[in-house]
Image (tube, rainbow, N blue to C red):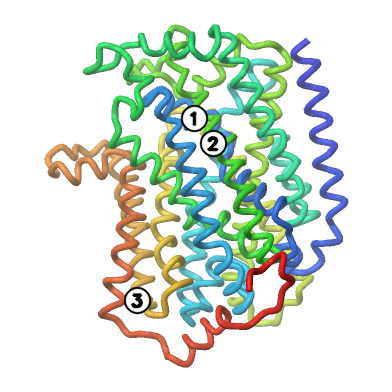
């Protein structure tokens, strides 16, 4: 029965995705349409595109299981941080200014923004290379967890699941570009909203209801606690939880695939509506995922344990929780996780291909490239990025002893946000930020990530590095937070002592914020 239900729902899901790809192909005839949807996406499409790009299967299967196991119900703070810092505050601080300035300087990607904001082609190329290096392993990580979930229902090889997901995502992105991605993100977002609510309800019912489940969880012991650690307000390790909240919430401000959503929104009124929609979406989806993961300890006797470390395999926690649920709920979860993965995958490959084409290939070309040729090259790179990420995921699954790929995934978020967040944020608001400070921030963010990678892979003993450094490089979460927060401090300090941009250039750049516009009274107050 479960197999039949899952098959029916997946076939319907695939059919809708393919139809959207065909339907939106008329919007993808030029670069502006293919990359930004003609900057005409409304609040619902933009908000759901932002949210579904934010929350992938990595969140639902990996992070929810890992942080729920480590912090209990307090892991819900990570979801609320994602909602109020990663969504609400991000939209309020970045949304309008990003839309206005990127349209004014005709920037279509984050590297393009750096190049035109600081009048520097080397900056554009350098940031493009950073995106290229760190988005590929991040893209490959999106397939994590699919194997164990599909294994609940289908007896098929893991590579088949990856191939189907990759081909379908590539199909609609290649045909319809940004608009196909945005519309499918909206559909996938609806599935995620209803799916997570259904799963939470089913898991709680399976444990006797909310109060009974919390009572069981409060009886689970933790080091230094007699009981109640996993139902306490801040959990057993508040400082570690704080680092998780900062990384997963503030990190979105510097990720090119997230910030890019603000480039495409249609109007000021849509920014206000999108802020509310995106925040509510994040509360339900992110808050729900981490809240669900908080009950993972109730299944401790069934979860697979890593014999080498004695710790659970975190990607198996959520699937284990779902294995006892009714067939219809499992079918919903399969489509939910596939939706979450495909929405983020489509956003990442579109970002990667457009960045590499517009910011590396086009400037290096000796001949003038037509709009049609640029779109064709982007489509080729979409195929390339999807093939590479799928190949990495399949290789990683068949060679579990290879840890390099997994560690690259862990540091990619911190590297991208650490390099880009501060110069992008300051670049929108402050005329005083300099090109030199941006270069230093790029180096800082990438260097922290590489050091973390080397320490983890080589098994370097950092206990003698001192209390602070040992804690910073204890995990990619801690070092990622240090990279981001450090960038916010480094950029203004370096800017105070380095060469400023030409005043006339800066005045022209920031003139976009002073332009007078007319609007109806229902959209703007006098």
Q: Which mark is residue 286?
A: 2
What is the C-alpha distance between the residues marked 3 and 1? 40 Å
Q: Position of residue 378 (x, y in %)?
A: 69, 62
Q: Position of residue 472 (x, y in %)?
A: 25, 45
Residue 21 in view (yes/no): yes
Horizontal side, residue 110 vs residue 458: left or right: right
Q: Is residue 189 left or right of residue 287?
A: right
Q: Nearer the viewer, residue 240 or 215?
A: 215
- Looking at the rendered structure, which numbered label has been put on residue 290? 1
**How much space separates mark 1 and mark 2, taking CA atoms?**
6 Å
Element type at mark 3: helix
Q: Residues within 10 Å of mark 1 (few under 14, many from 20)?
A: many
Pointer 3 residue: 436
7 and 396: which one is in front?
7
Q: Earlier in the sequence, mark 3 or mark 1?
A: 1
63 displayed left or right of 101 = left
Q: Which mark is residue 160?
A: none
| Residue in the picture at 29% in, 16% down | 222
- Seen in the picture, residue 186 relative to 366 is either above or below; the reply is above
Q: Secondary structure at mark 2?
A: helix
Give the mark, 2 or 3, whose residue is nearer the N terminus: 2
Q: Quadrant of residue 394?
A: top right
Residue 392 appears in the figure: no
Density class for disc 3 (Cα within 10 Å; few <14, some 14-19, many ≥20) is: some
* Relative to 455, residue 130 above or below: below
């Amino acid at each position: 029965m479960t197999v039949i239900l899952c098959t029916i729902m997946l076939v319907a899901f695939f059919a809708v995705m393919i139809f959207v790809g065909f339907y939106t192909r008329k919007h993808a005839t030029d670069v502006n349409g293919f990359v930004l949807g003609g900057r005409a996406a409304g609040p619902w499409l933009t908000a759901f595109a932002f949210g579904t790009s934010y929350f992938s299967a990595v969140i639902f299967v990996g992070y929810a299981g890992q942080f729920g196991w480590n912090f209990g119900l307090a892991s819900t703070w990570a979801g609320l941080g994602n909602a109020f810092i990663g969504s609400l505050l991000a939209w309020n601080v970045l949304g309008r200014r990003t839309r206005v300035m990127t349209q004014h300087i005709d920037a279509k990607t984050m590297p393009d923004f750096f190049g035109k904001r600081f009048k520097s082609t080397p900056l554009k190329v350098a940031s493009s290379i950073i995106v290229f290096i760190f988005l590929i392993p991040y893209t490959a990580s999106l397939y994590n967890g699919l194997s164990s979930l599909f294994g609940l229902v289908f007896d098929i090889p893991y590579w088949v699941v990856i191939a189907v997901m990759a081909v379908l995502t590539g199909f609609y992105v290649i045909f319809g570009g940004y608009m196909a991605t945005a519309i499918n993100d909206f559909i996938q977002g609806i599935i995620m909203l209803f799916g997570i609510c259904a799963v939470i309800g089913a898991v709680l019912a399976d444990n006797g209801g909310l109060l009974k489940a919390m009572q069981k969880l409060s009886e689970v012991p933790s080091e230094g606690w007699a009981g109640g650690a996993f139902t306490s307000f801040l959990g057993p390790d508040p400082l570690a939880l704080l680092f998780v909240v900062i990384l997963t919430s503030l990190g979105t401000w510097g990720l090119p695939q997230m910030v890019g959503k603000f480039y495409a929104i249609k109007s000021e009124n849509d920014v206000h509506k999108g802020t509310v929609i995106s925040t509510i979406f994040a509360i339900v989806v992110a808050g729900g995922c981490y809240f669900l993961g908080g009950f993972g300890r109730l299944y401790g006797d069934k979860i697979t344990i890593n014999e080498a470390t004695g710790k659970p395999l975190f990607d198996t926690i959520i699937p284990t929780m779902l294995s006892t649920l009714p067939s219809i709920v499992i079918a919903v979860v399969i489509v939910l996780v596939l939706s979450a993965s495909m929405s983020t995958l489509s956003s990442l490959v579109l970002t990667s291909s457009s960045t590499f084409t517009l910011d590396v290939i086009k400037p290096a070309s000796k001949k003038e490239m037509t709009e049609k040729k640029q779109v064709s090259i982007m489509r080729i790179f979409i195929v390339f990025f999807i093939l590479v990420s799928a190949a990495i995921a399949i290789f990683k699954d068949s060679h579990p002893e290879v840890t390099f790929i997994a560690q690259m995934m862990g540091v990619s978020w911190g590297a991208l946000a650490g390099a880009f967040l501060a110069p992008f944020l300051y670049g929108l608001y402050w005329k005083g930020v300099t090109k030199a400070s941006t270069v230093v921030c790029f180096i800082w963010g990438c260097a922290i990530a590489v050091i973390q990678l080397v320490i983890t892979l080589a098994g370097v003993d950092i206990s003698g590095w001192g209390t602070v450094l040992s804690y910073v490089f204890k995990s990619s979460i801690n070092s990622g937070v240090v990279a981001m927060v450090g960038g916010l401090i480094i950029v203004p300090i370096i800017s105070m002592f380095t060469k400023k941009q030409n005043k006339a250039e800066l005045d022209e750049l920031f003139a976009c914020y002073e332009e007078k516009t007319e609007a109806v009274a229902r959209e703007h107050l006098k």
